[in-house]
Image (tube, rainbow, N blue to C red):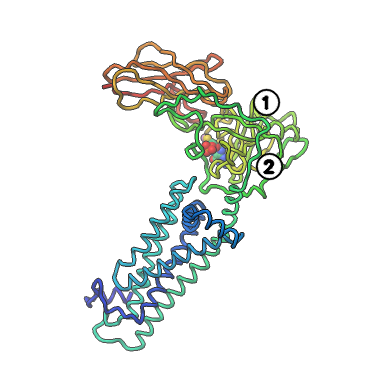
Amino acid sequence: MALTASRGSGVTSPTDGDHSASNRHAGWAWLAGVVAGLAGLASTQVIAWLLTPLGDPVSAVSEFLLGLFPSGLINFGKDTLRFADKPVLLIIVALLALAITGLSGRLEYGRRWAGAIGPAVLCVLAVVAIATRQDAGFDAFPPAIIGTVGVCYPLLRLLIGRLRYWAEPSVFLRAPRPRAQVREARRNFMITSVAIGAASIVVGTATRAAAGGKSMALKARSLVTLPKPATPAPPVPAGADLKLDGLTPYVTGNGVFYRIDTAFQVPIVDPDTWSLTITGLVEHEVTISWKELLALPLTEHYVTLTCVSNEVGGGLAGNARWLGYPVRELLKRAVPRADADMVLSASVDGFTAGTPLDALTDPHREAIIAVGMNGQPLPAEHGFPARMVVPGLYGYVSATKWIHSLKVTTYAGDQGYWTPLGWSARGPIKLASRIDTPTGQVKPGKVPVAGVAWAQHTGISRVEVRVDDKPWQTAKLAETTGPDTWRQWVWIWDAEPGHHTLTVRATDADGRVQTSQQAPPAPNGATGWDSKDVTVG
Ligand SMILES: Nc1nc2c(c(=O)[nH]1)N[C@H]1C(S)=C(S)[C@@H](COP(=O)(O)O)O[C@H]1N2
Ligand SMILES: [Mo]
């Protein structure tokens, strides 16, 4: 307050590069920088805890540096420090960050804005480190950016302002101040510094402790070694992937797989304390632990997952190799009662899905409790440690991530999460096809028109393409591992100059032709033909 008041009253203010800065107080400027650094670090911990542990800049930078170290040094560190290697690196990184903010305090004291360099460098370093993390999404960046630019530097300016007011009375007043005023200014700086520093240490360590469970669970994921499947997936035929520019690959990578859920924060579940229970209308309640689940003979199976919210031509579908244990085998142990017709699967985050009991007990439908996705433990975003995957049903009625229980029940007595919100209780996936390429502008001549088509659990028997209102042309179908996945298709178009509309429709293995009738996603899936406008010339 006093600071703005004296500035406002027109008293000379310090010019940039004012060298009257008292060196006696330079040490306090370092301290101010360290305190602001502590606040910045604490805020990164809180924000990362709220958003995603992948956003913790200290861990990200440590990991990043570890990647740059020669392996000899890493092994030396591991051998000498044993289990303490990670914490020691984290502490070194945090101390280095504080040293940089301390230096920034000193720079800022010497020259206004000069102290911005430290937080800016830390921000860039953290963002680069986070961006190199495999699974990091956009929610991983706010902690680093807010912590450095939004918290650290503004507090550093605040503290340096108070320090100046204490240290350089002549800057703010014409005459030297009475001792009492100097003492008050000093007290002001001290109290603010101690308060911010203490609060940061308390909040930072408390959050770190609370988040400890999360990072432990993430670490647990990194320690999981999936067993080899007792029944491996059939190899992907060479002809399943046409490998055309712009065409969706047959298998979707974990990093680019679409993600849909209601979770604000990705639930992170520790597999060591995880279990799956089967309750409800059963003869025996069954509980199975992570260890028990992994010890069972697992099967691996390619399944294309699809979201009911997918618009015609949309991208909310992905194909992965899922490793898991058949739900029907678990249900066999529980013995569902005759009056049951639905299984309500529940997630640790409260989400539920209602799946027809017969889809889960059907020996010909590979409904599994999945633990692996494309050869890796499920990514946290896709349900680690376990989720359900049921071929042929939209995700909202079958694909519960972070699953913890199956309640055998009835459609009359229970509802999945989305049903009271206006979506159908049952959600079989509708026959669909999509044009991936070409889009926009192409040159006249031979142009491959290609995309994917799906009718999970039934299979695709034909795809046809139409240019404008010309007759339908039959596309060439790529191979597939089976009816539970999408199928690529291609048709070579002899493109003539002008504006054209390409349209696609599929026929399933039962001979049903995809309807042209347009329907929105709600309440049980969109229908209609996908078409793309293309300019040839
Ligand atoms: N716990 C939980 N599981 C969930 C959901 C959810 O909101 N919460 N969404 C479902 C929906 S609507 C779909 S389409 C799939 C998407 O799975 P994915 O994010 O792995 O692609 O997960 C299903 N499982
Ligand atoms: Mo969905």
Crowdedness of circle 2 by 10 Å Cα count: few (<14), some, many (20+)? many
Dividing the image into four equal quarters, which quarter contains ligand 1?
top right
Which quadrant is home to the C terminus?
A: top left
Q: Which mark is residue 532?
A: none
In this rendering, does residue 421 appear at all?
A: no
Label total for image: 2
The amino acid marked with disc number 2 is Leu
Q: Give percent across and percent down for residue 450.
A: 42, 22
User: Residue 307, how many percent across, how many down?
Assistant: 51, 32
Is the CB of mark 1 within 8 Å of ligand 1? Answer: no
Q: Is residue 62 visible?
A: yes
Q: Nearer the viewer, residue 92 or 206?
A: 92
Q: Position of residue 46 (x, y in %)?
A: 49, 59
Residue position marked by numbered label 1 in the rendering: 362
On screen, residue 360 above or below 180: above
Q: Position of residue 89 (x, y in %)?
A: 52, 61
Image point (54%, 56%), residue name: 74
Up/down of 25 relative to 456, above or below: below
> On the image, numbered disc 2 is attached to which residue?
276
The one nearer the camera, 38 or 447, is 447
Q: Is mark 2 within 8 Å of ligand 1?
A: no
Foreground residue, 401 or 444? 444
Q: Which residue sits furthest top?
A: 471
Q: Amino acid at mark 1?
A: Asp
For the N terminus, give its image quadrant: bottom left
Relative to residue 363, is residue 503 drawn left or right? left
Classify mark 2: helix, strand or loop: strand
Location of residue 292 by image quarter: top right
- Is the residue 258 above or below the residue 197 in the image? above
